[in-house]
Amino acid sequence: MESPQKPSYQPATIEEKWQKTWSELGLDKTPQDQNKPKFYALSMFPYPSGSLHMGHVRNYTITDVIARLKRMQGYRVLHPMGWDAFGLPAENAAIDRGVPPAKWTYQNIAQMRQQLQRLGLSLDWETELATCSPDYYKWTQWIFLQFLQAGLAYQREAAVNWDPIDQTVLANEQVDNEGRSWRSGAIVERKLLRQWFFKITDYAEELLNDLDKLTGWPERVKLMQANWIGKSTGAYLEFPIVGLDEKIGVYTTRPDTVYGVSYVVLAPEHPLTQVVTTSDQKAAVAAFIKEVSNQSELERTAEDKPKRGIPTGGQVINPFTGEEVPIWIADYVLYEYGTGAVMGVPAHDVRDFKFAKEQNLAIKVVIVPEIGAEETLKSAYTEAGILVNSGDFNGMNSVDAKKAIIEFAEKQNFGKLRVQYRLRDWLISRQRYWGAPIPVIHCPECGIVPVPDKDLPVQLPEDIELSGRGGSPLAQLESWVNVPCPTCGTPAKRETDTMDTFIDSSWYFLRYPDAQNAEKIFDSGKVNDWMPVDQYVGGIEHAILHLLYSRFFTKVLRDRGLFNFDEPFQKLLTQGMVQGLTYMNPNKGGKDKWIPSNLVDANNPVDPQTGEPLQRLYATMSKSKGNGVAPEDVINKYGIDTARMFILFKAPPEKDLEWDEADVEGQFRFLNRVWRLVTDYVVQTEQVTTNNGQLTKSEKDLRRFIHIAIQAITEDVVDEYQFNTAISELMKLNNALTDADCHNSPIYAEGMQTLVIMLAPFAPHIADELWQLLGNKGTVHTQTWPSFDPTALIADEITLVIQIMGKTRGAIQVPAKSDKAELEKYARESEVGQRYLEGKEVKKAIVVPGKLVNFVLG
C-alpha cells in the first residue's frame, strides 16, 4: 500500500485561500460584545503615496501580531485602518500630472488598500476612513467650531514664507536649504499675513503634568515632549524707552544677572523697532530688516551661524541701575518667541558674549564663582555663584538673588514672577487647496461668523485650477468665496485658508469606534468604551507634534463634554526604521553620492561611472539612496508569512532593522521545517495512544519543553513585545518536537497543536493550513492562547555532574527531590564515582544541590 502523498509548502496558494476564508468568516470585524475586555490596537495611519514600503510592512505587522494575540487571549479587539489623505504632496502631484488631487489620492488609496489586504492583516475594513472624504472632514470642521466656541481658535498676523515670483505662501518643506522656493527658485521672503491659530498654550501645564500618567510610553518620547513644551520659571521685566512712554518687556530665567545688562535686543519684526529707531539709523535698519526677512527661522537661530545685528539708535533705562543702555535689533531674536525682545548680559550668556565681542559692546561681570574671584572673562560664566556689582544684592548667592530681585521688581512695579513655555500657539492656516476648508465666513457687518452646523461640510469645490501660483487657489474662485452672511444676509466672503493636515490626524483615532456615524462625530458611549487606544504603534518622527496635538485635542474635546478620559494613547511603541544595504561614493556630493544597489556588483563595489571604490553601509531605505526593497518582490519569492517572520525576528520592534536577504531565506527555511514536521506527523503517525496518566521519561521531558516554551513566549509577547526572542523559542520547540521519539503520544499531539497555535499571530496563513492538516475544524485564530502548567516545569530527574578535585569526570541522572546525603550516595555508587574513587581516600564531598558533587581527595 502506498503511503499518503505529503503536500509541499506553497505560500501563494495557502495565503490566498486563507485570506478568502477569513473574509467569509468575518474574522476581523470588531465585536460589539461588551462582556469581553476590550483591546484597541492602532498603527499610525499612512499617507496614500501610492505604494507600500518596508517601513509600512513593519509597522502594520507589529500591530497585527498584537491584535491577533489579544483575540486569542480572550479580548474583543478593534484594529482599524484609514488614510491621512490631505496635504501638499497630492496638490503638487495634481499640478505636475494635470489631475485633480481627489482623483490622484483615491487611486493611491485603492492601490495601497489592495497591498495591505494582500499582507493578510487582521484589519476591520468596515471602519476605514479617509481624511479627505467630506463625511470625515465635516467633523474636522465641526471640531474647529468647537475650538472657536471655546475661545481656543483665533486670527492674528504671523510671519509666513512668501514666494515673491509665484505670489504664494510656502510651507517650510517647500523652501530648500538655500532659502529658495522649491518651484520658482526665488529667494523666499518672510511676510506678515493674518493666520488662524489654536491656543494650545492654554493646555501647556496639563500637557506637561499628564506626561506622568503615560507609564506605557518610552521615556525618551516623554522627554522630547517635555522639552518641546519647555516650561521655565523666571522674571518678566520692563525697560522704559528713553524719551518715550513705551517700555520694552523681556522674559529672563536669569534675573540674578540683571545688573549686567549692557544692551537690549528687539526682533527686527517687533512693532517697537520702528518706534525706537532714530532718524540717522532708519536707512541702515530698514536694509537690515529686508535682509533678515529673506532668512528662514532655521537660518536665523542656527547655532553655527554668526549672530548679526545693528543698533537702532534708541536707548532704554535699566530700572535696577538707572543706566541707559542701547537698543539693538538682531537676526537671532524672533518676534514669535517670548516677548520678541531679550536683555543682553554678555558676561553670563554664551550667545550674548559672542555678540558683544563682535559688536564691541560692554561686558560687565555680576556673578563670580566665589567671593574675591577674578572678574576678567575669556568666556561667559553661566553657572551659579555670588553676586558682585549688583547694588544691594552684592554677596548673595545667585539662587537666593533670583527670588529677591523678582520680589524687588514686583514692589517697584517694573517686573514680576512669570512661568513661561517654549510652546507656541499652533498656526493651523494653510493657503492651499487640498485640505479641510476653515468653516467661517467674514461678514463686513458681523465680523467672523461660524458656518452653521447644518451647512457642514463646507466642501472643496471641484472646478478649481491649480497652478501653484498666485496665492490661495480657493481665494481665486469667486463663485465659491462670495456668499451671504448666515446671520444677517449681507454679502460676505468665505475663509479661503484650509487647515493644517495635523488637524486631521489629531482626532482620527476617536472616529474609528463609530466610523459609520452620519448623525454626529461619534457616539460618546462607544468612544468611552473603546478609548483610550491600548497600544499605539508608529515612527519616532511623530514623537513630538502628532502625539502632542492628539493629546491637546483629547483634552479640549473632553472639556467640551464629549467623553470622559484624559489621554488618547495608553501604551506607545515607536518602531525602528528599516535599513537597506547602501553604497556611497565619498568623493561625490549631494544626491549623486548614493549609488543604487542594483547598479553595483556586491563582490566588487565600485562606482559604475567612475570606477571609484564605494563605501558599504546600512541606511534607511529610500528612493533617493536606491537601497529600497519592494514588499511585493519579497512576497512573490517567499510569501507573506516569511516576510512577517523576518521583520519580527531580525530586531526588537523599537530598534532599526537591517534588511538581509540571507536572513529572509533563513525564516523561509524555518517555516519549511515546521511544515515538514507537521506534514510528516500527519502522514506517518498512526493512532495516538493513551498513557493512563503514566508518562514515560521522554513524554515528561517533552511536556516540560512545551510548557517552558508557552511560559517564555507568553512573557515575551504580552508585555514587552520581544517578538524576536519569542520566535527563537518557537524554533526551540520545533527542534524539541523534531528530536522527540514519542510520536504516538498525546503529549506529542499537544506539542504539535501548541506549536501551531503559538505560531499563528506571527505567520497566520501557514498556521491555519497546518491547523487544518492536524485535523482541526475552523480556524486557529479563534483558539485560546495556551497557558502554561507550572507543575509541568518540575523535573522528575536532574543531571548531576560528578567532579573529582574540581574536574568534571561525568554526569548521571538522579531523582530531582534528592537531598545532599542522597546525592553524595548516588555519586559514590555511580560507575563514574567507583572508577575514580576506588582505592582513594575521600577527604571531603562538596554537594551543590541540583547541580554537582565534587570529591576532594586526601
Image (cartoon, rainbow, N blue to C red):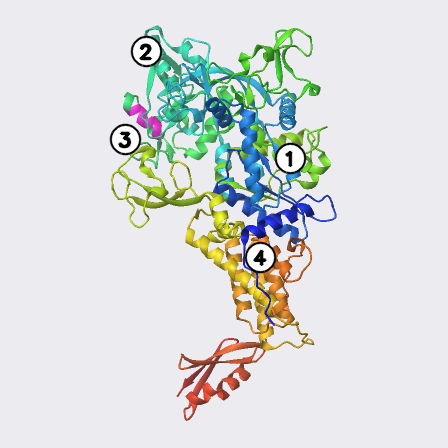
Whether pointer 3 and pointer 4 mark residues with C-beta atoms closer than 8 Å, the reply is no
Magenta part mainly helix, strand or loop?
helix
Residue 560, position as x, y percentages in the image? 68, 28
In depth, the one of 340 and 771 nearer the eye is 771
Q: Which amino acid lies under the numbered mark 3 shown in the image of this protein?
A: Thr
- Disc 2 is placed on an element classified as helix
Residue at left offset 58%, top offset 15%: 495
Q: Mark 1 highlights which residue?
A: 510
Q: Which amino acid lies under the numbered mark 1 shown in the image of this protein?
A: Leu
Tell me where the magenta segment starts and ends, as one range: 349-357
Does the image show residue 848? Answer: no
Q: Mark 2 highlights which residue?
A: 284
- Disc 4 is placed on an element classified as helix
In depth, the one of 332 and 639 nearer the eye is 639
Q: Nearer the viewer, mark 1 or mark 3?
A: 1
Whether pointer 1 and pointer 3 mark residues with C-beta atoms closer than 8 Å, the reply is no
Residue 556, position as x, y percentages in the image? 63, 29
Indicate whether residue 351 is drawn in magenta.
yes
Residue at left offset 54%, top offset 47%: 62
* Quarter of the figure that contains the N terminus: bottom right
Q: Mark 3 highlights which residue?
A: 376
Q: Which mark is residue 759?
A: 4
Q: CA distance from mark 2 to mark 4?
A: 73 Å
- Within-10-Å neighbours for mark 1: few <14, some 14–19, many 20+: many
Lower position in the chain sequence, tag 4 or tag 1: 1
Q: Which amino acid lies under the numbered mark 4 shown in the image of this protein?
A: Leu
Q: Which amino acid lies under the numbered mark 2 shown in the image of this protein?
A: Ala
Q: Nearer the viewer, mark 2 or mark 1?
A: 1
Residue at left offset 41%, top offset 8%: 243
Lower position in the chain sequence, tag 1 or tag 3: 3
